[in-house]
Image (tube, helix red, strand yellow):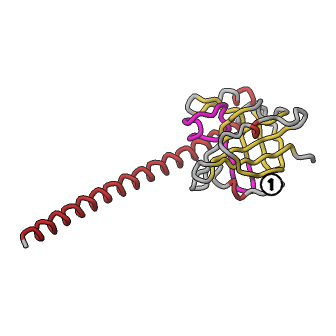
Amino acid sequence: MGNMKENTKKRLIFYKVIFVIIAILTILVAILMIFKYKQRQENEENNKEILEELNNNEQQENADIKIDGIKVIGSIKIPKINLEYPILEETTKNTMNLSITKFCGGNINDYGNLALAGHNNRDGTMFGRTKELVISDEIELTDLNKTTITYSIVEIFTTDPNDVDILTTKDEKIREVTLITCTNGNKERLVIKAIEKNN
């Protein structure tokens, strides 16, 4: 009888400890999510200010605009999904948390393929809503000279993260943009290819 009571006590203590651990972990996850949300909101506000600066400044001044010391080389706008961000000149873990980044290619609106990378955020920020895009939707890129070129989507597909063929330029005589973001729990890449729209 004494053993049963002892075992029951031990079980109750064990369950209490497990409950406390789960409660602490839940609180930590909630705090982390709130922190990430606040950080994203701050980034969104900062990006809006940068876009205003790009639109209002003279061309020479635009060449000096930076986010956290990283140069802004232009902006991207996708009207259908209400997306508009400055484009940073390099892709790193840090820069991808700040805005859309240049993954590879030439300058904004140069001939050839320009690849841009962005996070697929669950709250719809960055490239979080690109899955809503379809063939012939439009992407607008604006360079530091305030020249805007409209691109029309011609291809949407998923691929392996190690697929480098998506970065190659198939035709140096056309302007092409490739948008890249993670999907399927980071196991694949969603790729959106667009070429300059003929007016």
Quick check: can you spot residue 52?
A: no
Is residue 65 visible in this depiction of the protein? Answer: yes
Question: From the viewer's perspective, is residue 46 above or below residue 107?
Answer: below
In the displayed structure, does residue 139 sit left or right of residue 53?
right
- The residue drawn where x is 59% and y is 33% is 92
Q: Return the residue nearer the eye: 47 or 81.
A: 81
Q: Nearer the viewer, residue 72 or 107?
A: 107
Report the number of numbered marks: 1
Q: Quadrant of residue 72?
A: top right
Q: Circle 1 is placed at which residue position?
A: 137
154 in magenta: no
Give the left or right position of residue 96, taking residue 139 as reference. Answer: left
In this view of the protein, which residue sits in the foreground, 1 or 23? 1
Q: Residue at position x 58%, y 36% from top?
A: 95
From this view, report whether residue 184 is shown above or below residue 176. Answer: below
Answer few, some or many: residues within 10 Å of disc 1's Cα (few below 14, many 20 plus, some between 14 and 19): some
Location of residue 54 (image quadrant)? top right
**Amino acid beneath label 1:** Asp
Residue at figure coordinates x 90%, y 34% from the top left: 173
Q: Position of residue 42 (x, y in %)?
A: 52, 45
Side of 189 relative to 166 (left or right): left
Per the image, is 86 magenta?
yes
Question: Which residue appears farthest toward the left when viewing the image?
Answer: 2
Picture coordinates of residue 25 (x, y %)?
A: 34, 54
Q: Quadrant of the N terminus?
A: bottom left
- Which region of the structure is painted magenta? 78-100
- Image location of residue 78, percent across then percent down: 74, 50
Helix, strand or loop at label 1? It is loop
Image coordinates of residue 139 in percent, x first then y, are 78, 48
